[in-house]
Image (spheres, rainbow, N blue to C red):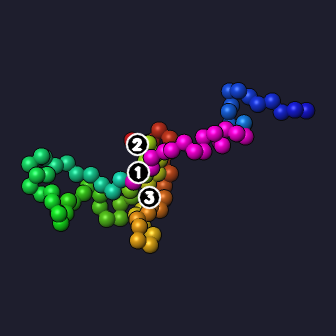
Amino acid sequence: MSQTNDPMNPSQDPSFETVLSDIPLELSVELGRVMLTLREVAGRLGPGSIITLSTLTGDKLDVRVNDRLIARGEAVAVGDRYGVRIVEIVEPGKGQ
């Protein structure tokens, strides 16, 4: 008996994953945010400046794909680079 692919379910097609596998997505990790006035930016921003962010040490960081929250994680050092260890996957519809 031959297997017929359902056109309404493209994931059954073995080439579906192959076709989509090289589509670029932007993954970003948000360390924190802060609201400043233009005056504060002009007065405080310069070489050596430290801007305090809203995120506390130890807080989970938001992991986003194409601006959609998909996970939360912890900052880690990987050699001389930063990385993120995923500790929570956000349920669809729960991300902001």
Which sits in the foreground, 93 or 11? 11
Q: Is residue 57 visible?
A: yes
Q: Please report contact status of discs 1 and 3: CB closer than 8 Å, yes or no.
A: no
Q: Disc 2 designates what residue?
A: 67
Q: Which of the pair 21/5 is nearer the observer? A: 21
Residue 66 locus on image (x, y percent): 44, 42
Upstream in the sequence, badge 1 or badge 3?
A: 1
Query: Is residue 95 among the parts visible in the rendering?
Result: no
Disc 3 residue crowd, few under 14, some 14–19, many 20+, Cα 10 Å? many
Q: Secondary structure at mark 1?
A: strand
In the image, which residues are magenta?
Answer: 14-29
Instruction: Find residue 56 and report its horizontal and vertical position in percent.
Output: 29, 61
User: Of the residues shown, which amino acid type is indicated by label 3?
Assistant: Gly
Q: Which residue is mark 3?
A: 73
Mark identifier at residue 18: none
Percent coordinates x, y for residue 42 in the rendering: 10, 52
Q: Which residue is mark 1?
A: 28
- Identified at 81% across, 30% down, the residue is 4
Three-letter residue code for mark 1 = Ser
